[in-house]
Amino acid sequence: MLDLTYEAPKPKVIAGAKHDWELVIGMEIHAQVSSNAKLFSGASTAFGAEPNSNVSFVDCAMPGMLPVINEFCVAQAVRTGLGLKARINLFSAFDRKNYFYPDLPQGYQISQLYHPIVGEGEVLVELAPGIARLVRIERIHLEQDAGKSIHDMDPNLSFVDFNRTGVALMEIVSRPDLRGPEEAAAYVAKLRQILRYLGTCDGNMQNGNLRADVNVSVCRPGDYERYQATQDFGHLGTRCEIKNMNSMRFIQQAIDYEARRQIAILEDGGKVVQETRLYDPDRGETRSMRSKEEAHDYRYFPDPDLLPLEIEQDWVDDIAASMPELPDAKKARFMADYGVTDYDANVLTAELDAAAFFESVAAGRDGKQAANWVINELFGRLNKQGLTIAETPVTAAQLGGILDLIASGEISGKMAKDLFEIIWTDGGDPAEVAAARGMKQVTDTGAIEVAVDEIIAANPAQVEKAKANPKLAGWFVGQVIKATGGKANPAAVNEIVAKKLGL
Ligand code: ADP
Ligand code: MG
């Protein structure tokens, strides 16, 4: 594996009217655990089901119902922790977070405040080749999702759908280590990629399966270094939390807006009030949802219905033994084994199935050429038609077959592109299709010489011009390739034309 070393990026500096300011961002990400059943009941988690069809007595808090922990969800949290190089806590416990809302039938959410299942970890967020931010993870805890209130179906009534009630979430809390809007978005993207590799969350942001609370503050240059040296939050500015963001673009816009809002307050001699805000994408601004004074007192206490969660190191070790190769390792290996560039390695490892596709094309072939074809021809074509790699009409074996025909000199690069188009629409074995269509590059120098001689004999004036200006020899090369129906190997034609013209 390559030893990749990174330099930390510079923090984003925003010029105020009086001073320069730096951004400080910490994120709390809610990731829905990939699991067929809920955290404390056997009800299904299927998305898009008929409202209130996936609700057990536990989920809708019928009197006397008791939660039973879903072992698979616990394993998923452990797997996620291991994927983020985090400490796994063999002892953790569930607490009740009490509040009233119509989509929360229990009157409390079961969460883990005092003893989360996962402790400190880290995520490497690459921003450019060789530039990356190492973001510290503070904790990951397991908790229940709430239901969904529907206010826009009837002018007089609100409805509740309890299908999502009790679905397992992982809350992944970062330290305030992100220093700009691009970094924040890149962090969400990297976390999403790791979760998808692990199979612990599908990362579907549109469905709300991955959403972020973004904490933003601003400070003067030098303050963050003082915070880092002491871990004393007193060196940082007062933060505001922007709730429930599920778009990378809006996350960046909201941070940018929020930073400017806070700077304007501070430079005006005011104080930033710690509060929860919501981003309005239509207006491009954040607005207050509730201040710290109005913050809920959740009266957390250990849930008496659930025993503390004690897991065994052997069980954690078994999960560790089944970990897949993660994005950073795969990227380093692709660069080392296939000689692909940093940029190409990022593209090829973005999704697991695309990476696997590339590897089966590249195995035993020229890695760089395979990367070019997979990225430029295949991904380019898939994007154009809005298809995913799983839907590709050209299989890895077929693309590999095309590359083999290029490697053996049987077809030219230009023919290969035509062949790719044919296989894309009609399918078939590349070698057979090429043979059936007479796609064969002429490398037989005898045949090429005959063609060159004919063109030279028929164009004496052009010959004189080319002899005076060798750049014009290209015209002969073009004529010969045309005369052979595009089949003559261009390198061979070039050589023979130059020789015959005495260049
Ligand atoms: P709470 O439980 O009230 O949400 P936490 O201390 O758990 O508070 O912090 C929540 C998030 O806010 C974490 O991701 C943390 O990194 C971030 N955070 C804390 N202080 C700041 C700050 N001054 N600026 C930006 N983010 C911060
Ligand atoms: Mg919070």
Image (cartoon, rainbow, N blue to C red):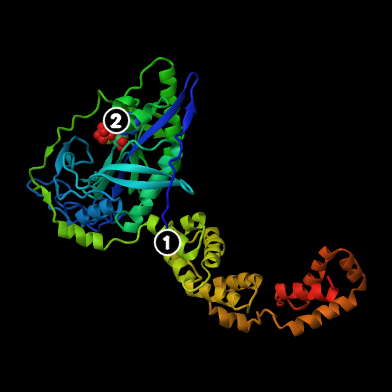
Where 48 sits versus 280, above or below?
below
Q: Position of residue 84 (x, y in %)?
A: 30, 50
- Whichever of labels 2 and 1 marks the residue nearer the N terminus, that label is 2
Find numbered disc 1 in the image and state the secondary structure of the residue it sits on. Answer: helix
Q: Quadrant of residue 251?
A: top left
Where 115 sits versus 415, above or below?
above
- Please name the amino acid that badge 2 sits on: Thr
Q: Quadrant of the N terminus?
A: bottom left
Q: Position of residue 389 (x, y in %)?
A: 46, 63
Q: Residue at x 47, y 21 (%)?
A: 19
The answer for how far apart the CA atoms under marks 2 and 1 are is 37 Å
Q: Quadrant of the C terminus?
A: bottom right
Q: Are marks 2 and 1 in contact (CB under 8 Å)?
A: no
Horizontally, residue 19 falls left or right of residue 213, namely: right
Horizontally, residue 273 falls left or right of residue 424, namely: left
Label disc, if present, on residue 333 of the rendered structure: 1
From this viewpoint, is residue 241 visible? Answer: no
Which residue is nearer to you in this view: 54 or 499?
Answer: 499
Question: Which quadrant contains ligand 1?
Answer: top left
Q: Position of residue 35 (x, y in %)?
A: 25, 57
Q: Position of residue 241 (x, y in %)?
A: 33, 32
Find numbered disc 2 in the image and state the secondary structure of the residue it sits on. Answer: helix
Query: In the rendered image, which residue does mark 2 sit on?
Result: 230
- Please name the amino acid that badge 1 sits on: Arg
The crowd level at tag 1 (other Cα within 10 Å; few <14, some 14-19, many 20+) is some
Q: Quadrant of residue 26?
A: top left
